[in-house]
Each structure stands twice: as structure tokens, then as C-alpha cells.
Amino acid sequence: MKKILTAVLATLALTATAQQPKGIPVWPDGAPQSNGLSGEEQWTKNGRITNVSVPEIYVYPADPAKNTGAALILCPGGGYLHLAMNHEGHEMAQWLAQNGITGIVLKYRMPNGHADVPLSDAAQAVRIVRSRAVEWGVNPQKVGIGGASAGGHLAATLATHFDAQTRPDFAVLFYPVISFDSKIAHSGSAVNLVGKSLDPKLVELYSNEKQVTPETPPTVLFLSDDDRTVPPMNSIAFYQSLKANKVPASLYIFPQGGHGWGFNPHFRYHENWKDLLLKWLADRKITAQ
């Protein structure tokens, strides 16, 4: 049985790295709430997808010869208006799979002012991965959430707003939006998530540096000092809250790079962040076989 499972996973891994896997519906029977968007999804000239109202996950199984049992769900960024599915999603997931970590890209719905919609998609993605852990060669106690920019905000939101079924085991954040405090917020993400009125209660609820508890999972953050889109203070504030709550955390700030580098090989510290992430996962025993 083990040999058969290994062979199946090997075939899936080869297929996944050769082409984008088929999307798996997050809500096959329909989402519990609507985001109010209609019409078809659209791809922009720069490779972003907009008008997302049907969430899916794309699974890149870990290389069976290297499989650590760990899985990382990736939430691409895009200001809660569109999704940078490739360099903050599929390309990262393929690399993770090659290094023994099942990479899962989440195409989450755009909130359109319905703040709870993306979070419900992310939480459901965790449930799906754990429910299919055996099939996908995943340890259900090694399921992490990751994201970049606004996707990092979504990942940080799940890491601070979860229940017993949906708590991630670790979090990986790339230049994340964290706070909706007007002094450091990425205003576009805030408005797109909670609406133009910026209801103070929702601003407080989704300022994730204020929602950290001792139960927040271990977290690693990567960003650039010269980020002019999402101020580095977002990550610093989150790191400070993690430490105040005695949550294991690491913060890596690169001197240059700006915002949105994702899996771009031209980013000066591309190899550095990959090495640091793999070492962090190993040090946390997440990828210990």
C-alpha cells in the first residue's frame, strides 16, 4: 500500500511541476456567503486575476523522495482587488514541492467590502488539506498558512482568527499588510476588505498586530527595508506582538528589494530568503522527517 501511495504521489508531483494542476473547489456545494461580485474572472496584462468569486486550491504534491509531511497554503497578494497568482503562488508552490513541502495555492475570493469572505476561504482551505492529508502525503499537524502583501494580511488574519479546526501550525509572511492603522496601513487593502467607511470596529478587528495571542502559531516574516508600498512597520509591529505573547518568531529585513518580489529570481536576495525559509522550517522541526 505504501509503495502504491508513493507511486501515485510521484506521478502527481511530476504532473504538478510540468503544468498547473487542476483547481479543487473550496466550496463544492456553494460558499456560505457571497462577495457580491458577478461576471467572469479576468486576467490582466501583467498576469493578475481579478473579479474572483469562485475560490479554488491548486495542489503541488511534495517530491515523494523528499516529502517532509509539511504543507504550506499560499495566499497571493494584490490589495484584495486582484491576485498575483504566479510569482506569489504557483511558482512558490512548485519550489516548495521540489523541496519536500506540499505547496498549495489558494485562489481566494475578493472581499468587495465583505470582510469575512477571504478569511472563510482560507479557513476552509485548511480544513480541506487536513481532511485529505493521507491522500496528499501531508501530516495534518504540519499545515501552515503563507501569503504575500494583502495575501500576507489574509494569512496573518487566519493566524490570529481561528478555531480548533483551522489553526495553522505555522505562518510564513512576505512583506505583509498587517495593520489598518492609518499611520502605516496600505489604504487600498483596508478599503477593499472592510469598505470605504472604514468601520472602526472592523479596522480594529483586522489590525492583526492587535489580535495576536499566545496561541498564534510560530511565524517567519520576510520583507525589504525600502518597501514604499507596505511600510516595514507592519511586519515590525506584528513581530513585536508575537514576542510580547511569547510566540516563536523570526524577522528578516533585506536592505533592498522594494515590494512584491515574490519568487522573482531577479530579486537580489532571492536565494537568501529561500535558504532562510528552509532553515527556519527545519529549525522549527516542521520539515523534520
Image: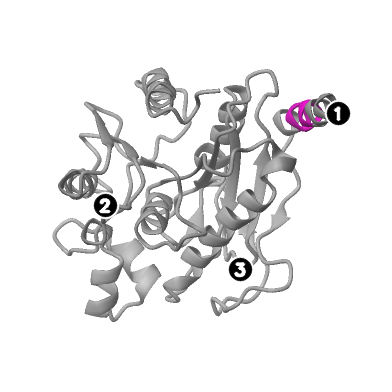
Instruction: Assign a secondary structure to mark 3.
Output: loop
Q: Nearer the viewer, residue 231 or 243?
A: 243
Where disc 1 sits, the SS reads helix
Where does label 1 land, which residue?
A: 4
Residue at x 55%, y 50% (from the top left corner):
48
User: How crowded is the residue under tag 3: few (<14 C-alpha within 10 Å), some, or many (20+)?
Assistant: many
- Please indicate whether residue 134 sits to the left or right of residue 153 in the image: right
Q: Residue furthest front?
A: 1
**Residue 13 lies in the magenta stretch:** yes
Q: Which residues are magenta?
A: 9-15
Q: Residues within 10 Å of mark 1 (few under 14, many from 20)?
A: few
Residue drawn at (60%, 77%) of the image: 32
Residue 58 in the magenta stretch? The answer is no
Viewer-nearest residue: 114 or 82 = 114
Does the magenta stretch mainly form a helix, a strand or a loop? helix
Q: Which residue is mark 2?
A: 214
Q: How much space separates mark 2 and mark 3, taking CA atoms?
A: 34 Å
Amino acid residing under circle 1: Ile
Which residue in the structure is indicated by mark 3? 53
**Disc 3 or disc 1, which is closer to the eye?**
1
Instruction: Give the quarter of the image for residue 223.
Output: top left
In the image, is residue 285 above or below residue 217? Answer: above
Q: Could you tell which of marks 2 and 1 lies nearer the N-terminus?
A: 1
